[in-house]
Amino acid sequence: MLSYLFRRLLATIPVMLLVAVFVFMLLRLTPGDPAAIIAGDYASDAQIAEIRGKLGLDKPLAVQFMVWIGNMFQGDFGESFFYKKQVGELIAARLEPTLSLSLLTIFLTVCIAVPMGTLAAYRQGSWLDRGIMGFSVLGFSLPVFVIGYMLIYLFSIELGWLPVQGYQRIGDGLWGWLSRLILPSLALSVVFVAFIARMTRTSVLEVLGEDYIRTARAKGQTETRVLMRHALRNAAVPIVTVIGLSFAILIGGVVVTESVFNLPGLGLLTVEAVLARDFPTIQAVILLFSFIYVLINLAIDVSYTLLDPRIRY
Amino acid sequence: MSTASISPGRQTLWRMMRNPSVIIGGALVLAVVLMGLLAPLLGARDPADISPKDRNKAPGYETTVRDSSGQKVPVVYRLGSDTLGRDVYSRIIYGARISLIVGVSVAAISIVIGMAIGVLAGYVRWLDGIIMRVMDGLMAIPAILLAIAVVSLFSAGLTSVIIAIVVPEVPRVVRLVRSIVLSIREEPYVEAAITAGTRTPVLLVRHILPNTIAPLIVQGTFIVASAIIVEAILSFLGIGIPPEIPTWGNIMAEGRSVFQLYPHNIFYPGLVLALTVLAVNMLGDGLRDTLDPRFAKRL
């Protein structure tokens, strides 16, 4: 197990290195001189030359890349062109809203989607099943910003139950924090609920046809117990896989949701950085998100052994 | 009617035409296509026409404008106006064009590129490892972030948005094509063709590529749906298509600042966007069930 974990960790290195190469090449692929882009439209030639020297742009590409990677390992992500601050500090300051939003979204999704999918499978072919599947197709097609604005309109403007936009740190009061996150995480979770409910249904359906389910029923166990202990547990591996895969959509959704609800997180930082052409920040955020994505998928692979003792490495 | 007498291709077509998802989704998609094509005939005015006195009007607002001969002509803002007094109805109708252009061209380009790379990876053994590692690397970057990154390189515009959405889609097509090529090349009829001395290009075109058509049509449909969403997202965030061009994302971006007072600028384009994506996804689901039953079973 430990050697498997180690091997998997090693295997992520080439992938991450490739991501790093892509992200590094981003700035180099821009038409024109990166130093001139960084300096802005009104810079003098001397300023441009100074920036070129400071960034090491006069050195060969491979050397530049090694320096860039080396700096990042020491926690130096460079300085933001736009905010004139260390990118590392910028990211640290924006971490809390994004983490809160993501975790709450995943929590909501699992709480809604897994029972929904299980129920749909249990009552296969019924109106309930069709309704849930219909919702799943719909949920997949509703863009998160449309849902977001619909929720704001209904709950914040018409009913006045929740704040419209903005963020409050968790340290400043639990309700203030939660009340501003309910709508964003609800909006963001719709697409995952659609996705995961569908997968849960397929997976549970497959398991419900197995002999051990019949045995469990023949033993006289309650239906709840059959579903929870026997069906759902055995159906867990594909469900967890899909949850892992949907992290990529989650990260994309975070960018949009934070813009709609004005949450000052990493997603909003990404958009601001692109609008300001702040390449060090763009690079760092993309690298960070990709790194998290790769690690989460690794964690999911490893979790299979916990969910299903038959899987051994 | 006996189905034994008609060819398998006809049978598939027959099944497809009777699949409810294909019918409903297809009809809705057709409606959006017609909406884009026939925009001037649907009572849409110039979507860029600014009218400062008619800003932020509610749906159904009526006024008069002077035409070129000085005559007063009545004008209705069916779905209200935006912050510059432009007609939201006309902008939504014309917006269909951009969404469709982006959706279809992203699907076509990523399939062509993905197919070429996928065949190469599946057929040239020594290239396989390298290509697939590069694709893994690309896929490790969340799609929207990759699109945002690519968009940040170019100046805003239709072409750069299309390129930005194509880049994250290509690895997915490559994987699909490669896996099909890998499984087909082990088939006895392919081995027989190789033994018979069929040259590689002929082998590819005649025996291998036809097998990728059905899955690629299905995949292509889903790419259209996701490209339409991503374009709307990029435009909505203000980093996609320039704001003066009417796209659904741009109309919503325009409506953001006054959303609390005038929600219609977000709701109507949002509704049309959601319906369009729903239609394309339904069409894709139906096509998958009828064209590619093996895949349908897996999901």
Image (cartoon, coloured by chain):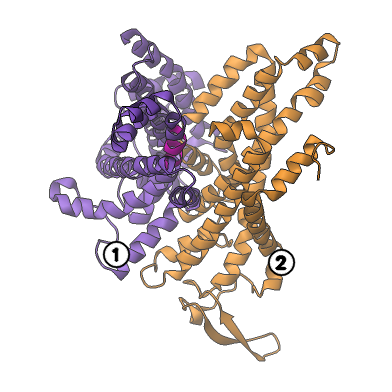
Chain colours: A purple, B orange
- In the picture, measured across the screen, residue A166 lies left or right of residue B102, that is left
* Residue that sits furthest to the bottom in the current view: B71
**Residue B287 x, y percent position in the rendering:** 65, 43
- The residue under label 2 is B38
**Residue A199 placement, left or right of A2:** right
* Residue displayed at 34% across by 24% down: A299
- Majority secondary structure in the magenta region: helix
Q: In terms of image quadrants, where is residue A4?
A: top left
Q: Which amino acid does label 1 sit on?
A: Ser
Q: Give the range drawn in magenta.
A: A196-203
Q: Please, which chain is the residue tagged with disc 1 on? A: A
Q: Name the residue under label 1.
A: A156
* Residue A248 included in the magenta stretch of the image: no
Q: Is mark 2 on a helix, strand or loop?
A: loop
Q: Relative to residue B121, is residue A293 drawn left or right?
A: left
Badge 1: how crowded within 10 Å, few (<14), some, or many (20+)?
some
Report the residue at 70% width, 62% height from top: B34
Q: Can residue A26 be seen in this view?
A: yes
The answer to whether residue A212 is above or below residue B229 is above
Q: Where is residue B48 in the image (x, y as percent from the top left)?
A: 60, 69
Chain ID of residue with mark 2: B
Residue type at numbered disc 2: Leu
In this view of the protein, can residue A249 be seen by the observer? no
Which of the 4 quarters of the picture holds residue A292? top left
| Quadrant of the frame with the C terminus of chain A | top left
- Characterize the local packing of mark 2: few (<14), some (14-19) or many (20 or more) Cα atoms within 10 angstroms: some
